Amino acid sequence: MSAWTGSEVKTIGAAIAGALVARLIIGEFGWRDLVAVAFMTVVYPFGEWAIHVQLLHLKPFRWRGRTVELPTAAAHREHQEHPERLDLVNFSPREALAILCLAVPVTAAPLALVLPLGPVVSAVVTAYVLVGAYEWTHFLIHTAHRPRSRYYRSIWRNHRLHHFKNEHFWHGITNTLGDRALGTYKDQREVRRSETARTLQPD
Ligand SMILES: [Zn+2]
Ligand SMILES: [Zn+2]
């Protein structure tokens, strides 16, 4: 994992710029671009939730007689163990590339069945901007920066509860939509303090 460093900004910035240039070259903008942007904006919170729950919190599993831990899960466990270490907050270059080159195209691909290439690329641009927002927001939440706006306070609280109260709830970083829709947004008084919030070991 790396801090919110130059390389992180460069990788995501280059992805946004590249996709944007591709979109401009294709041309022919229209209402379908709005549909594509709306699609990605609606799907994104659930993607953020699913990656956090399914990939980052995946427990080590047995495979061919060996115990395997996904690199993403190992990195996230380290982050949960040391939430104060800013060098462990953001994705490693490899993780960032996997999201930009794999997760985003796979999510945008179904659009190609119903929309021309231009709007599909618009969806990719949208996703890259959202991934950039995710990385920046996650980093900011772990700094000493205090929330001032209501919205930022709500996501700041959400993520801190995930780290310090119970790791099975409050998975959203940039929003709480996924948590609210999928049952992991609770009044913190109703949730017991988890012994494993920092270690992510099985209870
Ligand atoms: Zn965190
Ligand atoms: Zn987590």
Image (spheres, helix red, strand yellow):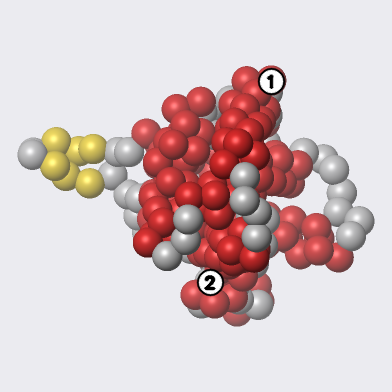
* Residue 186 locus on image (x, y percent): 60, 76
Q: Is residue 72 above or below residue 44?
A: above
* Picture layout, residue 1 above or below residue 188: above
Q: Would you identify the image quadrant in which residue 160 lies?
A: bottom right
10 Å crowding of disc 2: few (<14), some (14-19), many (20+): some
Extreme left residue here? 64
Q: Give residue 200's position: percent from left, percent from top.
A: 44, 49
Q: Is residue 195 visible?
A: no
Q: Residue reaching furthest top?
A: 6
Kindly identify which residue carries mark 1.
Answer: 6
* Residue 1 located left or right of residue 174: left
Q: Amino acid at mark 2?
A: Thr
Sequence-first disc among 2 and 1: 1
Instruction: Give the SS element for disc 1.
Output: helix
Q: Amino acid at mark 1?
A: Gly
- For mark 2, what is the residue? 184
Quadrant of the rendering where the C terminus is positioned: bottom left
Between 35 and 3, the residue placed more toward the observer is 35
Residue at x-position 8% and y-position 38%: 65
Q: Position of residue 47 (x, y in %)?
A: 49, 58
Q: Quick check: can you spot residue 146?
A: yes
Residue drawn 47% across the image and 31% down it: 97
* Observer-nearest of 91 and 197: 91
